Image (cartoon, coloured by chain):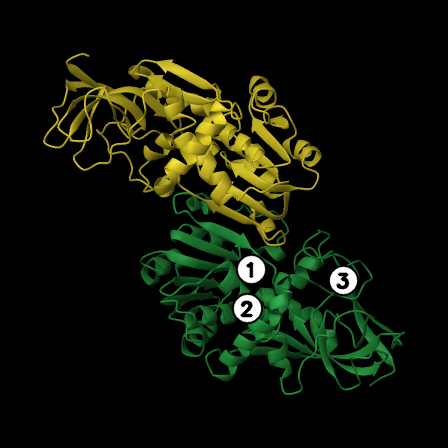
Chain colours: A green, B yellow
């Protein structure tokens, strides 16, 4: 525990990838918790594509991060001082603590506790927003059903890999993952139990999909947008569903990319394309976590982590999501 | 009754609008009904945008019309000879009889009867596929709810005008129609009871939508695709729905138009975009017709018709759908 709080603030709005001008590392005194507040030492940052979206000056499901504000980020921390009745030093908590050493958990904010036995990787990954996004997206939005043919893009990412494995557990007949390296493709098939993997950098995606999904795609999980979304829309099965989880190919785009011309296939295919935000399911997080815990402990879901050491490397860790250099959940150990 | 059957067959696949080379008028002997069949004199053709789609060599919810085949078309007719137990001369029936004077209703094909008191305009329009598309699209796909802000494109068309009026009947707070002439816009507001009409040829659509739908669009009914779809996606309200009924702007396109870049708004808005085909609701047609009949007779739904005289003008009548010269249901009196 130092007597300074290092914090990474947004210095300017990025155009394209985050660079040295985007953020600034500041030092401030460690804040003092007021009445009903707790002081949390942040131990691990959850590095998620949505953070890049929050840096744009665009209203989304949360407001943009303001210039000069700490970069918003889900994170795991440990209570070091508490004026709250429900928390005491040593308790582990999860919240949008941001890219900094210390954060205040405000009076009245719900304490999202993380039991001592849960590793940080699981707390932020499989049992965190990442895994729950896979759960609610597959179960509630995609309504995955026994026998489905499921395709997942960004499949070697934290959410995509869990989503595909959940589909398999819930009875999907075929699960195909799309990823960007041979290493990732091998991991998907050999470790995560996907039936097929397509390398979008080297394979003919449309041709491989026709071969691996001869009856069309019942459920396409989209993490990427762009050309891959369009290709998958073009191969939807009757009553196919497209679950819109993200659009990694678009977050750093400096010009507006055309939308998917094949959206029109939703008419003859009676298809549905739907977006969602996992925060809407907060009252069912316990249900998802119980299932994910059971599947994880039972060896039915495998995860990978990409750990980056040091708060100061958080901006680089964010870029890694978009260069495709990471496999699984990206976490910064503060 | 002549002793010839004039039939308009597909001579070549059109690129863009239908022209003189697209179809050919042939004369053949009037067919003779075989065992279990009925001979139907076609009296009225339902001219629908989907016919243009069937002329392309693209598999859709029905196969393409083959070269040399009669142009497929919903139509109303009268039985003139019958070897079926369930039909006798004089009965009025509805089916995909096509652009011709006489058609055979095959053995085993269900007889879709039209009671004598129902005018042809209503049988093909409000109580036909047109009206039922509005019904199932609003009720089942769009799930229109009390208080909704609804926007309909192609609003002065046969389906759009009914869809908007159904929304109003079912409690929508605001219904905005988008159409292409001042005459149509006036009809929408003064006759069909829309709250506002936007002329897409002369108005700033995005600005007018911001003014008329200040809380965003809860339900957007899309008949047109293209730029209007994109604009409406950009102004969706939270949990907004896009009902994909058609894409008139695309059916004659000779190049692939970009898709709607604003599809991505479906994520933060938790939105849903869904296509449908009314034929899937066949087992509930009676339910829809009963409601539409009640609303029509009760003066709660107003319709308009654009009648074209003469089978030989069916190709021109089809083009009228795309030039925007028609208001309401386009019907050819054979």
Of A216 and A317, which appears nearest the observer? Answer: A216
Disc 3 on helix, strand or loop? loop
Give the farthest residue toward the left: B35
Which mark's residue is nearer the viewer, 1 or 3?
1
What is the number of callouts on the image? 3
Q: Are marks 2 and 1 on the same chain?
A: yes
* Rendered location of residue B234, percent (x, y): 62, 43
Q: Are marks 2 and 3 on the same chain?
A: yes
* Rendered location of residue A204, percent (x, y): 39, 59
Q: Which mark is residue B104?
A: none
Disc 2 on helix, strand or loop? helix
Q: Which mark is residue A159?
A: 2
Q: Earlier in the sequence, mark 1 or mark 3?
A: 3
* Image quadrant occupied by the N terminus of chain A: bottom right
Task: Estimate the spatial distance between the alpha carbons at disc 2 and disc 3, rounded to whole Å.
Answer: 29 Å
Q: Are marks 1 and 3 in contact (CB under 8 Å)?
A: no
Residue wearing tag 3: A21
Task: Estimate the spatial distance between the alpha carbons at disc 1 and disc 3, rounded to whole Å.
Answer: 29 Å
Q: Quadrant of residue B203?
A: top right
Q: Is residue A38 left or right of residue B33?
A: right
The numbered mark 3 sits on a residue in which chain? A
* Rendered location of residue B58, percent (x, y): 33, 40
Residue wearing tag 1: A245
* Image quadrant occupied by the C terminus of chain A: bottom right
Q: Are marks 2 and 1 in contact (CB under 8 Å)?
A: yes
Q: Is residue A325 visible?
A: no
Q: Is residue B179 visible?
A: yes
Q: Quadrant of residue A77?
A: bottom right
């Amino acid at each position: 525990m130092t007597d300074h709080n290092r914090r990474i603030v947004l210095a300017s709005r990025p155009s394209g990838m985050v660079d040295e001008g985007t953020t600034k590392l500041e030092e401030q005194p460690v804040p003092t918790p007021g009445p009903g507040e707790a002081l949390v030492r942040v131990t691990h940052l959850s590095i998620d594509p949505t953070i890049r979206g929050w840096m744009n000056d665009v209203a989304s499901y949360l407001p943009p991060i303001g210039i000069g504000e700490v970069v918003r980020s889900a994170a795991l921390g440990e209570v070091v001082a508490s004026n709250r009745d429900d928390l005491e030093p040593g308790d582990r908590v999860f919240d949008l603590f941001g890219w900094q050493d210390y954060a205040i958990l405000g009076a009245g904010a719900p304490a999202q506790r993380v039991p001592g036995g849960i590793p940080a990787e699981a707390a932020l990954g499989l049992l965190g927003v990442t895994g729950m996004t896979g759960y609610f997206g597959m179960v509630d939005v995609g309504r995955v059903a026994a026998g489905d043919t499921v395709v997942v893009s960004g499949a070697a990412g934290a959410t995509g890999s869990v989503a595909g494995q959940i589909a398999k557990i819930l009875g999907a007949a075929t699960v195909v993952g799309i990823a960007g390296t041979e290493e990732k493709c091998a991991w998907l098939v050999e470790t995560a139990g996907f039936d097929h993997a397509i390398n979008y950098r080297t394979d003919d995606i449309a041709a491989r999909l026709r071969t691996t999904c001869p009856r069309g795609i019942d459920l396409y999980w989209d993490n990427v947008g762009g050309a891959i979304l369009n290709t998958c829309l073009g191969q939807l099965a009757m009553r196919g569903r497209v679950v819109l989880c993200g659009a990694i190919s678009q977050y750093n785009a400096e010009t507006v990319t055309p939308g998917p011309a094949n959206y029109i296939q939703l008419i003859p295919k009676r298809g549905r394309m739907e977006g969602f935000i996992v925060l809407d399911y907060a009252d069912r997080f316990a249900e998802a976590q119980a299932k994910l815990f059971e599947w994880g402990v039972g060896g039915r879901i495998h995860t990978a982590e990409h750990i980056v050491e040091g708060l100061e490397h958080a901006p680089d860790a964010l870029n890694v999501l978009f260069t495709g250099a990471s496999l699984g959940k990206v976490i910064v150990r503060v």
